Image (tube, coloured by chain):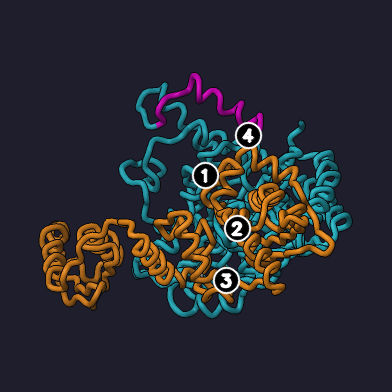
Chain colours: A orange, B cyan
Amino acid sequence: MWDYTDKVNDHFKNPRNVGKIENPDGTGEVGSLACGDALKLMFKLDDKGRIKEAKFQTFGCASAIASSSALTEMIIGKTLDEVEKITNKDIAEYLGGLPKQKVHCSVMGREALEAAIYNYRTGKKWDKELEGEVVCHCFGVTDKEIERVTRENNVQTLEALTNACKAGGGCGNCLPDLQKIIDRVHGEMGAAAVPEKKPLTNLQRIHLIEDVIDREIRPALRQDGGDLELIDVDGNTVKVRFRGACSGCVVSAITLKDVVEARLKDNVSEDIRVEEVK
Amino acid sequence: MRTVYLDNNATTKIADEVRDAMMPFLTDLWGNPSSMHTFGGQVKKYIEAAREQVAALIGAADPQEITFTSCGSESNNLAIRGGAEAMDKPPHIITSKVEHAAVSGPCHYLEDRGFRLTKIDVDQLGRLDLDALRREVKTSKTLTSIMWANNETGVIFPVGLIGEMVHEAGGIFHTDAVQAVGKIPMKVSSLPVDMLSLSGHKLHAPKGIGAIYIRRGTKVKPLVLGGHQERGRRAGTENVPYIVGLGVACALAGKHLTEENTRVKAMRDRLEQGILATCPGARVNGDPKHRLPNTTNISFDFIEGEAILLMLDDRGICTSTGSACASGSLEPSHVLRAMNVAGVSVHGSIRFSFSTYNTDEDVDAVLTELPKVVKRLRELSPFVN
Ligand code: FES
């Protein structure tokens, strides 16, 4: 069960400003059926350039509906210059917060607003691919969008990024690219994002691997009459051969993962993969 | 507000008879069945009686083929991990794309450790691709684990046929029957099934008790070591009250089997027909011909499942959804995706699952409230007007 705030529940059950506007000044449409949520936002300005009417239609879960409803309340009575400053965080705060897996609902609201303003100013339909290159194809998220979400929400991890804009939540193929963008943005922000260990040189790395095998792994295997030989280190792939009782043991595959790889991951690097050479 | 509970594939109410039967073991009869003294030792016979009740419900030839576990997930882990490790050569693991996580989890665990894993597809109605299965089981010695009935759609797989294919090629066949036991009649002794998992809380026993059927002669390496209990298959002092509860629940389920396939099925069918008649853009997911009598999974075009579920919840109606948003993941249920359910409705599925404790009033309540909810959400949806 989600821990929705009373405000989210209220805006979900009694959404404000549902519907369409005849001859709107700006219309923004984002999301799709396939993505699982979509929002159509419309507004009309008064003669002083303030939003006098805003309406929405949303396909999505409770927090998507609540975020859309909140957004319309937030923008009515304001000028476009004012509403342009609204971030997804403002929408979430207006609702008293959103569960972290639902942050993307507030991002969708902010995006629709941007799209509607673009439509008002250019008369054209907003297309996010105009603004950047799609990095996550599963959810059609562009590099610009990822950068913005990372910056505005101070995103530190891939998981937080996925929660905020869905990128990376499908097949996962884009994860390496997403990581690069997060790193770049943090670099630009000058924030000491993730304290990184000083990288090992190749030689240091091989020594460390040898050391861990000698100290931590072989003694354990020898107790059962087995042994292990280091054959090669190729990038993150460590090739080993089982000896003695271990070779031909049915559970050697399990030993490989649970003992050898786990120890090396703990002591050398999370990216290590161990392969058996027969 | 009255609670209308239509989420019985998630968990069920503890039957009064089950609770009453358990009480003595939570009060006076708290001894250890392994004790030499009379006070402890006397409870042993109640465990054996429960074993017979479980065996009777699934039609096992010998009660000793039943091992008590802590839950259906443990049974599945024991069958798959314990079964694979007990085979002389690491087997080729075969499973389907629509299994419960308690089966796909241990399968992936083995894959990570070097076992070959193949997952068989289903078609749009959720039916297993038997040709693909036939091809795969022949390639090498397999441990095949295919569910008896699907928890989300209720679709029933032809376990007899599957078991035959697996056996012909010399493999071992396990079936996760957590959703099937107590809902459809079965006699494992005359089926080509080597192992079968079941769970107490899906059939009106409490959570925290399950069992596994292991056909005589099938080898399994235990997961929990360190004791002689359950003939060495599962160490640990027996959970006597819950075992007794599971036994009584199985006896009750046996009595209710006919009703399950008449009265319960009739309620399910009336609900389904009623929804299709009153809610435009509703469609049933899953093979209508081979389905559990208590389950229906319905998708509503252009609206989202979590929103439907929460609006029903607001009206006291408990259901579940395969929508992505409700689970905290971004992808809709793996079952509906494997079935290639259309994009317009894959995010809008709701599962209603009955038990013998439901009434016609429950059906009426849904048929009154659901059309209003669907209409309201359609008004909100940008894809409708
Ligand atoms: S491309 Fe990003 S999750 Fe698939």
Task: Give the distance between the C-alpha atoms of the residues marked 2 and 4, in whole angstroms.
Answer: 55 Å
- Mark 3 lies within 8 Å of ligand 1 (Cβ measured): no
**Figure quadrant of residue A195:** bottom left
**Figure quadrant of residue B311:** top right
Side of A43 relative to A155 (left or right): right
Q: Earlier in the sequence, mark 2 or mark 3?
A: 2
Vertical position of residue A163 compared to residue B11: above or below: below
Vertical position of residue B240 compared to residue A87: above or below: above
Disc 4 target residue: B14
Q: Residues within 10 Å of mark 1 (few under 14, many from 20)?
A: many
Residue B210: image tag: 1
Examine the structure image and report whether residue B19 is included in the region drawn in magenta. yes
Whole-percent x, y for residue B66 in the image: 50, 47
Q: Which of the two discs, 1 and 2, sits closer to the camera? A: 2
Label 3: chain? A
Whole-percent x, y for residue B101 in the image: 51, 57
Label 1: chain? B
| Callout 3 and callout 4 share a chain | no
Q: Which of the two discs, 3 and 1, sits closer to the camera? A: 3
**Figure quadrant of residue A3:** top right
Residue A84: image tag: 2
Label 2: chain? A
**Mark 2 residue type:** Glu
Residue span colored magenta: B15-33
What is the secondary structure assignment of the residue under circle 4? loop
Task: Give the distance between the C-alpha atoms of the residues marked 1 and 4, in whole angstroms.
Answer: 14 Å
Q: Residues within 10 Å of mark 3 (few under 14, many from 20)?
A: some
For the residues labelled 1 and 2, say whether their Cβ atoms are less than 8 Å apart.
no
Task: Give the distance between the C-alpha atoms of the residues marked 3 and 1, in whole angstroms.
Answer: 44 Å
